[in-house]
Image (spheres, rainbow, N blue to C red):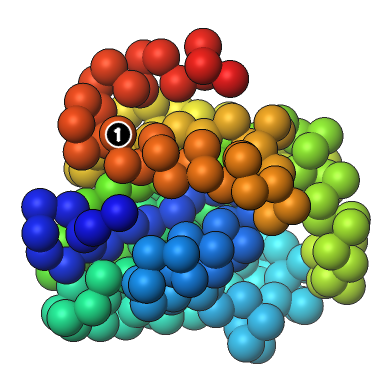
Amino acid sequence: MEPMAGRKTFIAIAGNIGSGKSSLTRWLADRLGYEACFEVVDDNPYLDDFYRDMKTWSFHTQVYFLSRRFENHRRITEGDRSVVQDRSIYEDSVIFARNLHDQGMMSDRDYDNYQDLYRTMANFFQPPDLLLYLKCSVPTLMRRIAKRGRSYEQEIPRDYIAQLNDLYDEWVEGFDGAPKLVLPGDDLDFVSSWMDFSFILDMIDAMRVDPDRLQASLFAQR
């Protein structure tokens, strides 16, 4: 697969916690010869506190993620290399910050401040060439979260994951900033199955030919 339109390509992978974004980022970057840009999670100094007390630490945690994501996005769009990114900057605002506010875990004052910061940043970033969304059910996400065993994730409430899933589906449905490809994450084992990984590569390649037709028929093919 060559870079889209014979130029540098920026692919962003979106998906809920436990959907497999990091694994898919690693595999795609290796197969395509792109640079992999991984989400900064373990380095967030607020994360342990956040999962123990979301209401107190939500604003600090989200601002940290947003600042790091903005720096990564800027570096990607200004650089010369094709890149696969683990989680897009859009998700910080329209998924995670919104969900915390909707659940009463972020105050109106903090949420308004956060959104003002996001809108200021949004004036400076360019959209990706392709958005991949790993769509997974809540049981699949909870099973994968438990399996990978990150201590700070084991206390994540199931309802929190379910709320995020609803917001992801709503956001992806209305997203028009770039071509998008929704992948059935429950059915794809791209880590263990070369056939499943090849299927994803084929779908990405097909996006350059007829993205509207592909989007309508993707789930029927599976």
Query: Number of numbered discs present?
Result: 1
| Image quarter of residue 11 | bottom left
Q: Residue at x 77, y 78 (%)?
A: 48
Q: Is residue 76 left or right of residue 105?
A: left
x, y percent for residue 24 = 56, 57
Tell me if mark 1 has few (under 14), some (14-19) or many (20+) residues whose alpha carbon lies within 10 angstroms of its own: few
Q: On the image, numbered disc 1 is attached to which residue?
A: 206
Along the viewing direction, whichever of 109 and 78 lies nearer the viewer? 78
Q: Which residue is drawn at 45% across and 21% down?
A: 218
x, y percent for residue 126 = 16, 61
Q: In this view, does 134 lie above or below 210?
A: below
Label 1 residue SS: helix
Q: Which residue is drawn at 49% across and 79% down?
A: 64
x, y percent for residue 195 = 62, 41
| Image quarter of residue 142 | top right
Quadrant of image for the C terminus:
top right
x, y percent for residue 5 = 10, 52
Q: Which amino acid does label 1 sit on?
A: Ala
Q: In this view, does 170 lie above or below 146?
A: above
Quadrant of image for the N terminus:
bottom left
Residue 93 visible at all: no
Q: In this view, does 64 lie above or below 156?
A: below
Q: In this view, does 212 lie above or below 131?
A: above
| Image quarter of residue 127 | bottom left
